[in-house]
Amino acid sequence: MGTFWSKERSPEGELPNELGRRQAVAGRVLMAVLLFGVLLASSLLLFFIFQSCGPCTCETPVCLDLLARYLASGNSSVDPCTNFFTFACENANGTSNSFQILAEENKSRLRRILEAPDSWRVGSGEEKAFKFYNSCMDTLAIEAAGTGPLKHIIEELGGWQLSGNWTSPDFNRTLRLLMSQYGYFPFFRASLRPHPSPPHAPVIQIDQPKFDIPLKQEQEQKIYAQILRVYLAYLNRLGTLLGGDSFEVQNHTALSISITSQLFQFLRPLEQRQAQGKLFQIVTIAQLQEMAPAIDWLSCLQATFTLMSLSPSEPLVVHNLEYLKNMSQLVEEKQLMHRDFLQSHMILGLVYTLSPALDSNFQEAHRELSQKLQELTGQPPMPAYPRWMKCVQHTRNFFAPTLAALFVRDAFNLSIQNAAMELFSAIKDALLTHLKMLPWMNEETRKEAQERVIQLQVKMGAPEWVLKPKLTNQYSDIQLGPNFLQSFISCVQSLQARTVQAALQPFPQHRWQVSPWGVNAYYSIPDHMVVIPAGLLQPPFFHPGYPRAVNFGAAGSIMAHELLHIFYQFLLPGGCPSCNTRALQEALLCLENHYAAFPLPSGVSFNASHTLLENAADMGGLAIALQAYFKTLLSNHGETTLPKLGLSPQQLFFRSYAQVMCKEPGHQDSQDTHSPSTLRVHGPLSNTQAFARHFQCPHGSLMNPSSRCQLW
Ligand SMILES: *[C@@H]1O[C@H](CO)[C@@H](O)[C@H](O)[C@H]1NC(C)=O
Ligand SMILES: *[C@@H]1O[C@H](CO)[C@@H](O)[C@H](O)[C@H]1NC(C)=O
Ligand SMILES: *[C@@H]1O[C@H](CO)[C@@H](O)[C@H](O)[C@H]1NC(C)=O
Ligand SMILES: *[C@@H]1O[C@H](CO)[C@@H](O)[C@H](O)[C@H]1NC(C)=O
Ligand SMILES: *[C@@H]1O[C@H](CO)[C@@H](O)[C@H](O)[C@H]1NC(C)=O
Ligand SMILES: *[C@@H]1O[C@H](CO)[C@@H](O)[C@H](O)[C@H]1NC(C)=O
Ligand SMILES: *[C@@H]1O[C@H](CO)[C@@H](O)[C@H](O)[C@H]1NC(C)=O
Ligand SMILES: *[C@@H]1O[C@H](CO)[C@@H](O)[C@H](O)[C@H]1NC(C)=O
Ligand SMILES: *[C@H]1O[C@@H](CO)[C@@H](O)[C@@H](O)[C@H]1NC(C)=O
């Protein structure tokens, strides 16, 4: 409209005389007529557009797929104003949220790729990945091989008393082989990682071990004892599966449990070490040898890190020296009294870690162990994963670079990347606008915050090397066959070597912490970079062909949520000295109260201050994505929505936001920093005035409360 008036006005000033004035009057009449015509035509056109499809529905296959998901998950007869969670998520199945479901689905995608006939290039790295997957799926061959391949390995390690063929083993030799050939570290962990202090050159780090059984320092004595009993029963079963006499086996397993339990007593949690200011120490190999003499450090580490040339003066970063000293003492004691049992302890641990590559007896024993441990620790039961899913996981683990490239070739392309970048820019712009409206930021903080948003880098989809993979065979060291166990072990060795090699390489750029098929976006503080993997830019979160409302509501909210993590330290106590602290504290308190006021399904509890930061990011993420979406409504026409749901585009935005959060309420992990799913839906949506307006929620209903909070 503005352009019409300015065009009319400007000639007027340029026509001074009578004639000119008359011409001007005639011109004005003409213009008015024209204008009227244009207005009439355009309103007819608008009428026609709204009449014919007001707004259009998207009926492409991708939209119909999405519709089917929405219809299956929600219950549209529930009043959205009193329980939007049920409206959107009533039939959320199981305890997985949409992210986990997406991650599972993407495993099916990898399966499809791996099972497609003749889809690899002979002699390439791909070929090995496909062959490995196939031998993992060949359960007939694995059953036929039985325990033979495993017994062979045990003999290579020096044998053990239990299976008869018995040479008195050398402790250091067995340990060296376990670490270097099988990637198994029974008494401590050793890895090559950047030095904690600048310039962060790679250095060998020694840390306390991670136990495979869920022991926790704060566990009740009763549960602790039960866990050990369950684990003991499992080890007994392993011993007999390997042909040991059940009485003799019991002697060995009992000692193994006692070693585990004693080592466990030596552990110190990170927080405790932090509090004591003893996070790590730098010692040389020679010094460590003196302090923890039971281990032949130089030979064990040299065998593990073959690419390095180590000497006694090599510095190590040691994370818990006390533990290593105690562990060494324990090993020496056991070596004196129960030499053979120490060997059994190491072999039983190895069998446990190799069990994924063993026959069905071992798989079944492992499954029962996990089930009992979950019951004891109150974890939700894990679904019984089908064989293919386990094989996809192993293949993914060992052949990550290849599978990344295959996944990206199948699931990601330039048009998705461009559409996602466009969405991201819109979200970023909205955040910049948003920063101007925050009452708790002063001018200086605001400038600084805006600067940080402007300087932020983003990686979308996959790292460069995945998008343009080299065709070299990077798995030349992997030997497949003669049985699955040997293939598995060869893959373990290759992976370990590649990990060390990668750590030794200078790496100026950002190193991706997720795989392209991952579904977790993240913000990397040192690189000041947001990373959004291709796995997340998939249905039902994102598709270039979706209605804009869906992409903004789902993927857009997630992007905005991640962006806000740039500023999370502002919200910590004392995190923003130059902010208006009172206004900020009030906003935070308001947020905490807002969440605490919601009714929760019975049996679900949560701690509103523990989840405060994530709640803030959920709430802010929604507000920013909404603002970005509303802005596109001003400049774009032809908004679409999904058929059958009866939702306007704006309503669809909110529905899509909720869909991301859908998860059966119930089990809430007390460590989880996110709120239960009902609150992740209700907290942010009820705090949004536009939600109440578009769903016409009466004042005072759950989703239209009398007061709201503004943090972001
Ligand atoms: C949907 O919600 C209504 C009202 O609460 C309820 O009667 C109905 O059983 C629900 N339908 C399904 C499929 O859960
Ligand atoms: C929910 O999961 C169960 C098994 O876990 C399955 O039988 C059922 O069909 C699923 N329901 C929906 C709606 O997906
Ligand atoms: C014992 O070891 C020898 C050589 O390592 C091997 O030839 C023999 O078959 C083994 N015997 C048993 C019973 O495993
Ligand atoms: C089990 O160990 C005890 C003592 O450690 C020993 O006396 C006993 O003979 C052992 N039993 C077997 C079957 O090895
Ligand atoms: C570890 O060793 C130190 C000194 O040798 C000893 O004081 C401490 O009690 C030991 N820790 C445990 C848990 O046994
Ligand atoms: C392992 O080797 C080291 C260094 O040679 C030695 O001090 C230690 O006693 C050996 N450990 C065992 C348990 O034999
Ligand atoms: C990219 O992928 C999308 C979604 O799978 C698809 O619709 C589109 O046709 C693809 N574009 C190109 C250029 O391959
Ligand atoms: C809630 O979490 C906070 C922060 O993590 C913690 O300080 C507080 O003790 C917790 N409260 C309860 C009741 O668990
Ligand atoms: C990840 O990628 C796609 C492949 O099927 C999407 O359809 C999707 O829903 C998600 N999981 C999948 C898809 O496998």
Image (cartoon, grey):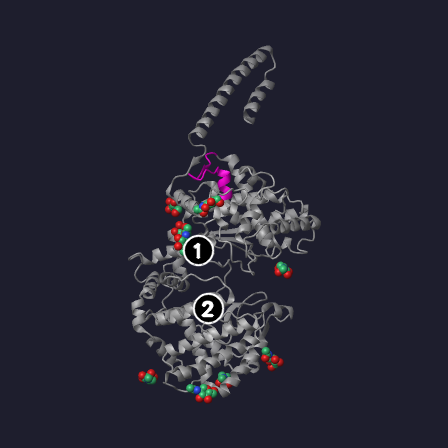
Q: Say which label, 2 or 1, has the lower sequence index.
A: 1
In this rendered view, identify the residue nearer to me: 367 or 346.
367
Asked if residue 307 lies left or right of residue 569, the reply is left
Residue labelled with disc 1: 103
- In x, y percent, where is residue 274? 62, 68
In the rendered structure, find residue 372 and report the number of the disc placed on it: 2
- In x, y percent, where is residue 194? 54, 66
Magenta stretch holds residue 704: no
Asked if residue 90 lies left or right of residue 243, the reply is right
Quarter-of-image position of residue 184: bottom left
On screen, 221 above or below 542? below
In this rendered view, identify the residue nearer to me: 29 or 637.
637
Secondary structure category for the residue under label 2: helix
Q: Quadrant of the N terminus?
A: top right
- Residue type marked 1: Ala
Q: Quadrant of ligand 8?
A: bottom right
On screen, 659 above or below 508? above
- In x, y percent, where is residue 187? 50, 76
Asked if residue 595 lies left or right of residue 396, the reply is right
Evaluate whether residue 355 shows in this view.
yes
Secondary structure category for the residue under label 1: helix
Q: How many other residues sit within 10 Å of disc 1, few (<14), some (14-19) or many (≥20)?
A: some
Q: Nearer the viewer, mark 2 or mark 1?
A: 2
Q: Which residues are magenta?
A: 637-655
Evaluate whether residue 177 shows in this view.
no
Q: Residue at image x 45%, y 78%? A: 346
- Residue type marked 2: Lys
- In x, y percent, where is residue 370? 45, 68
